[in-house]
Image: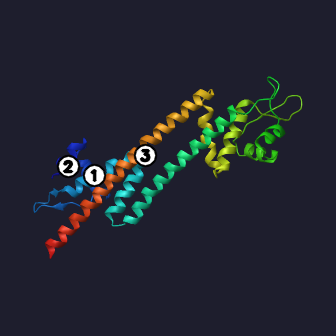
């Protein structure tokens, strides 16, 4: 195949294919006596694998995987793939922890007088933590309690309490404070339990889509490795 023949089924240009080869994403093409590139089924399999890896692992990781495979560094390439699957599992576990925290909130009776914020000691007692732990989370930027104008003591609103429950669940799951911060920022954009549940469901859908993309990418990568091995064996036979 010429570059344009390889590129056309995927809506690419011949130059894009040549660029992929130059970057190591595709294996080096053989040349005709006149110097033109000649692509084979091996290159088609490599291109399919790369295009499948992008939605599964991101463009940078997809490029790294293909260049490692084409440099015969298969173990390192598989490690990049494994890392992506591990990150997906972590994301699922994170959502589970957030969902547990929100569910826990709906089952905790609120014994406070109406419109009266919760004190640090009361919230610590509810979560079975030390007040110093809540203060540490505050210093890390995870909690932002106001102050009682009369006493100057910390005053936790319902939103602060929700954040504290989420942080508590994630910390129990082994998450670092720096890992929790961006999740809280996203959840604070929700305005109600229903919208929080909707945001979680939306993220679960995205993870499901990514998991299916990873499955497809793994299949295409496996096909490419099989085609590459066939090509290598065929060349070895021809030389002998």
Q: First in sequence, mark 2 or 3: give its number.
A: 2
* Local secondary structure at mark 2: helix
Colour logic: rainbow
Residue 100: x and y in percent read 63, 40
For the view shown, which residue lies furthest in the left direction? Answer: 33
Q: Residues within 10 Å of mark 2 (few under 14, many from 20)?
A: many
Residue 186: x and y in percent read 59, 36
Residue 139: x and y in percent read 74, 45
Q: Which residue is mark 2?
A: 6
Quadrant of the rendered image containing residue 155: top right
For the view shown, which residue lies furthest in the bottom direction? Answer: 240
Q: Which residue is mark 3?
A: 211
Q: Is residue 33 above or below residue 113?
A: below
Q: Residues within 10 Å of mark 3 (few under 14, many from 20)?
A: some
Structural distance between the alpha carbons of marks 2 and 3: 28 Å
Residue at (40, 49) in percent of width and height: 214
Q: Is residue 228 above or below residue 112?
A: below
Question: CB under 8 Å between callouts 2 and 1?
Answer: yes
Question: CB under 8 Å between callouts 2 and 3?
Answer: no
Quadrant of the rendered image containing residue 144: top right
Q: Which residue is mark 1?
A: 47
Q: First in sequence, mark 2 or 1: give its number.
A: 2
For the view shown, which residue lies furthest in the top direction? Answer: 114
Numbered badge on residue 182:
none
For the residues carrying marks 2 and 3, which lies nearer the camera in this image?
A: 3
For the residues carrying marks 1 and 3, which lies nearer the camera in this image?
A: 3
């Amino acid at each position: 195949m010429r570059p344009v023949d390889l590129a056309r089924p995927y809506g690419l240009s011949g130059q894009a294919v040549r660029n992929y080869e130059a970057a190591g994403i595709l294996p080096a093409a053989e040349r005709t006596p006149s110097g033109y590139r000649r692509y084979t089924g091996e290159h088609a399999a490599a291109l399919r694998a790369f295009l499948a890896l992008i939605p599964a692992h991101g463009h940078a990781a997809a490029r790294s995987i293909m260049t490692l495979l084409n440099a015969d560094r298969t173990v390192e390439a598989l490690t990049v793939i494994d890392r992506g699957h591990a990150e997906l599992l972590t994301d699922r576990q994170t959502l589970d922890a957030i969902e547990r925290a929100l569910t826990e909130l709906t089952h905790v009776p609120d014994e406070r007088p109406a419109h009266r914020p919760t004190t640090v000691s009361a919230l610590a007692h509810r979560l079975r933590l030390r007040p110093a732990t809540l203060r540490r989370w505050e210093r890390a930027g995870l909690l932002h309690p106001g102050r009682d104008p009369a006493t100057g003591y910390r005053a936790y609103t319902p939103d602060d309490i929700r954040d504290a429950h989420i942080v508590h669940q994630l910390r129990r799951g082994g998450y670092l404070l720096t890992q929790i911060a961006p999740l809280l920022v996203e959840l604070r954009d929700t305005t109600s339990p229903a919208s929080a549940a909707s945001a979680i469901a939306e993220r679960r859908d995205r993870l499901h889509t990514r998991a299916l993309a990873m499955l497809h990418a793994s299949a295409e990568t496996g096909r490419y490795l099989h085609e590459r091995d066939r090509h290598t064996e065929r060349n070895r036979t021809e030389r002998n």
